[in-house]
Every structure is written in C-alpha cells, then in structure tokens.
Image: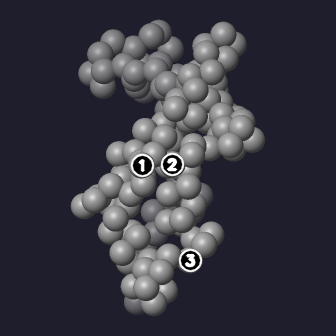
Amino acid sequence: MIKRAAAAAIGGALAVAAVPAVLGAVGFTGAGIAASSLAAKMMSAAAVANGGGVAAGSLVATLQSVGAAGLSTSSNILLGSIGSAFGALLGGAKRASPSPPPGGPRPEGEQPGENVPQVEPPKSPLGPEKHEK
C-alpha cells in the first residue's frame, strides 16, 4: 500500500515537472520560440497551412502560451491527478516470478508421468476383422 502511494506521488510530481522541461526542450521557451527548433518548424508549417499566420487556439499557439506563461493551477492539478493515477497503476503492478529451470528438479507430485493413469487401448468387441471377398 505504501509502495503504491509513493509511486502515485512520484508520478504526479513527475508529470507536473516534465511538461515545462519537455516544452523547453522542444523550443517553446519563456522568451518565445527558439530558432531552428522543432517548435520553429511547427510554427512555420502552421503559418504556411494558414496562409501566413498562426491561427489563435491552434496547437502551436497553445504550446507557445504554455511555454511562455506555464500551466494554470487547474491544469497542474489535472495533470498531477492523471500522473498520480498512472504512477499508482505502475507502482501496483506485480512482476511475474521467474519460472524454474526446464531441466531442474521438481517438487514431489509434479514429476512427469507421475499420477497419470495408465489406460490400455480399447479392445475390439468382435475380435480380429477378416476381409471377405
């Protein structure tokens, strides 16, 4: 239980802290869009697609705003909640136990052929068949 709570806390904090770092690495900085970055290429493609300008409310405009001003409190709460849920999900996942070696000894009662009934094949009730012409 404590392990899952710790994973949830780490997941929430990591999600909130990762957004500004990732946006800065992509090129959406506090000073605007960095030259020769992925953000600059996105802005160029959006401007070409819209006839020379970036549309308000588009992905590029939204990411530029978040890169410059950061996320709002409600967005941070939502992002932290989703990160916490994901962290708790991953933190509570059970790992499969390693299987025993294929040729190794097995516990008693699990030996191959043990406790397997030996059944004789059924006998024909009519005896051997003779082919008549």
Q: Residues within 10 Å of mark 2 (few under 14, many from 20)?
A: some
Ranked by sequence position, the earlier of labels 1 and 2 is 1
The residue singled out by tag 2 in the image is 68
Q: Amino acid at mark 2?
A: Ala
Residue type, mark 3 in image: Ala
Task: Please tell me which of labels 2 and 3 falls first in the chain.
Answer: 3
Q: Assess whether mark 2 and mark 1 are in contact (beta carbons under 8 angstroms).
A: yes
Which of the image's four quarters has the C terminus?
A: bottom left
Q: Is residue 99 above or below residue 21?
A: above
Circle 1 is placed at which residue position? 31
Residue at the spot 43% in from the left edge and 38% down from the top edge = 21
SS state under label 2 = helix
Q: Which residue is mark 3?
A: 55
Counting from the top left corner in percent of width and height, residue 63 is at 52, 57
Residue at 63 percent of width and 21 percent of height: 9
Q: CA distance from mark 2 to mark 3?
A: 17 Å
- Give the SS element for disc 1: loop
